[in-house]
Amino acid sequence: MQSAMIVPPAQLRFHVKHRPGADGPRAIGGLTGACLALCAVLSACSSPEDIADKTGVTATATAAASGSTASATAASAGADGVNFEDNAEQDNRTREFAYAWPAAASAIPALAQYLTTERDAAVAEQKTEWAGMLAEAGIVDCGSCYNISFSKEWKVVANLPRFLSLSADMYFYSGGAHGNSGFDALVWDREAGAAIDPKAMFRSEAALQDALGSAWCKALKAEKQERMGDDFSDDGFFPCPPIADLTLLVGSSNKQRFNRIGLIAAPYVAGSYAEGPYEVTLPVTPAVFKAVKPEYKTAFAAGT
């Protein structure tokens, strides 16, 4: 997809805190982060228009001729946006899939179709992956190794006259001790009718690093010290990651211009799995404004 990843709760931190470990958004997961970021056009499922015409929940259940496989698909739409689930079970082995977006996204038909395409590609890939796992079910003596799940929920970061900024929480599980969380972001440009990777609104990775790198590393260290207490060690085992390795969000406190930047490091990016993700919110400074591409400068303003 073109765009890689909440509503402001208070003050500067505008992205919801995520729980470390298996207590993520739904404590389920499945596909790798890369497969979601590279979603391509796949066979269409229910269009957002079809779903939006319905209220409540539409569900179907089917069973294979052998009676050993059961699946259920449910989609709900309305004032709260779209919530889609597609789950299956075979011989006590499960596949879980969940994908959601807010009403603000459903209100833009082209964006709703964009997200529908990504969702359909993701669930189709998951089904293919699970079928391959089940085909090998007799080779490895490990029941949980054949459980697979994935969830992705888009939320509003900022809704400006021209741009809608979204972030997504993701969780993956494909067997093993625990799953893992990931993040995504996009900005929808109403004038262009297209999705933008928030990082693409800036001149280059180097310009972003120069503008945000120092403040990010300082804030990350402070967050680590607060979170880990006496266990904090600045031994360099997890050095401060570059901005290029983070999910970047563009937010706003005035609903007119982007005046703050959110940075999220997924587990293993800035610390161990046990530490969980790290999130930092920084204001748009003159250095950040200088890094913005000319065509997007009118959408940004200094923050505090």
Image (cartoon, rainbow, N blue to C red):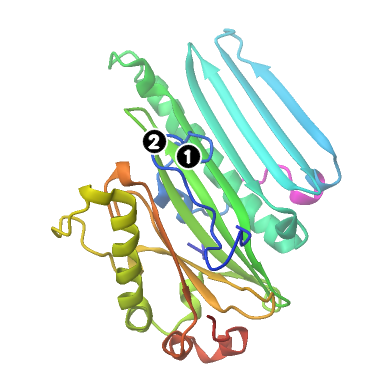
Look at the image and give the residue range highlighted in magenta: 43-50
Disc 2 crowd rating (10 Å Cα; few below 14, some 14-19, many 20+) is many
- SS category of the residue bearing label 1: loop
Is residue 85 found inside the magenta-colored segment of the image? no
Mark 2 lies on residue:
179
What residue sits 43% from the left and 39% below the top? 172
- Which mark sits nearer the N-terminus, 2 or 1? 1
Q: Residues within 10 Å of mark 1 (few under 14, many from 20)?
A: many
Residue 50: give its label.
none
Q: What secondary structure is marked by label 2?
A: loop
Pointer 1 residue:
24
Q: Quadrant of residue 131?
A: top left
Give above or below for 76 relative to 153.
above
Image location (x, y in percent) of residue 198: 51, 71
For the residue pair 46 and 197, the one nearer the viewer reads as 197
Where does the image place residue 225, in percent across and percent down from the top left? Answer: 28, 57
Q: Quadrant of residue 105?
A: bottom right
Q: Is residue 100 left or right of residue 37?
A: right
Residue 158 lies, with reference to residue 65, above or below; the image says below
Is 134 rendered above or below residue 22?
Answer: above
Q: CA separation, marks 2 and 1?
A: 9 Å
Image position of 13 with respect to 202: above or below: above
Give the residue at the far top of this rendering.
66
Q: Circles 2 and 1: CB distance less than 8 Å?
A: yes
What's under tag 1, amino acid-wise?
A: Gly
The answer to which of 66 and 137 lies nearer the viewer is: 137
Question: Looking at this rendering, what residue extends furthest in the front direction?
Answer: 230
Question: What amino acid type is highlighted by mark number 2?
Answer: Gly
Spot occupied by residue 68 in the image (x, y as percentages of width and height) = 55, 10
